Image (cartoon, helix red, strand yellow):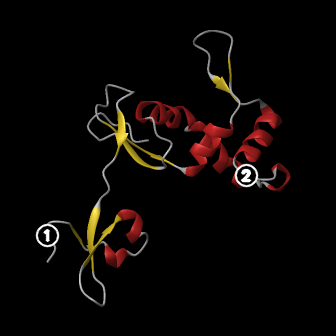
Amino acid sequence: MDDDDDAEVTFELTADHVRLLRAGCFRWGGSQYGLAQAGTGRDLDANLARFLGHDPDDVTPRQMRGLKRVLEATETALAVVLATGSFEPGPYRLRSPHQRMSWERAPKVTWWANSPTGPVQLTVEEAGDDVDAWSQPVGSGP
């Protein structure tokens, strides 16, 4: 999540965030202000791997670091889901960086792409890693 005061605050809700939120069995810590917990130590690693569709015995240390990054973003993912009422993966942004529950779906960015049959419009998801497709924003096309 980007959290600079002058910049737009954005978050990419992924299928792994959704999978973790849906599969998690969270219990609340000692007080009303406690943090959600999914286990501790080895228990946490095994649960996290299982929740995200991996065999805990086959997860490498590098893969586990990636899974833990998903877990670290769970608080923001939960805020996005609660604020929008949607578990749909994709980009989200805060309408106001000073209101933590003002998440909304970010608009899709559309670009003109060059194709053998002429210019076509693509969303960011459709363009993917095709750098040549990212030629010019909509509105400045043909």
SS for dot 2: loop
Q: Which residue lies furthest to the front in this view?
A: 85
Q: Which residue is drawn at 44% across and 41% down?
A: 1
Q: Which of 71 and 111 is in front in this view?
A: 111
Asked if residue 68 lies left or right of residue 118, the reply is right
**In terms of image quadrants, where is residue 60?**
bottom right
Q: Disc 1 versus disc 2: distance between alpha carbons?
A: 43 Å
Assess whether mark 2 and mark 1 are in contact (beta carbons under 8 angstroms).
no
SS for dot 1: loop
Picture disc at residue 53: 2
Residue under pointer 1: 140
Q: Position of residue 50 (x, y in %)?
A: 76, 46
Q: Where is residue 11 in the image (x, y as percent from the top left)?
A: 43, 43
Q: What amino acid type should be assigned to the residue bearing mark 2?
A: Gly
Q: What amino acid type should be assigned to the residue bearing mark 1?
A: Ser
Q: Where is residue 23 in the image (x, y as percent from the top left)?
A: 68, 39
Q: Which of 16 and 129 is in front in this view?
A: 16
Asked if residue 114 lies left or right of residue 64, the reply is left
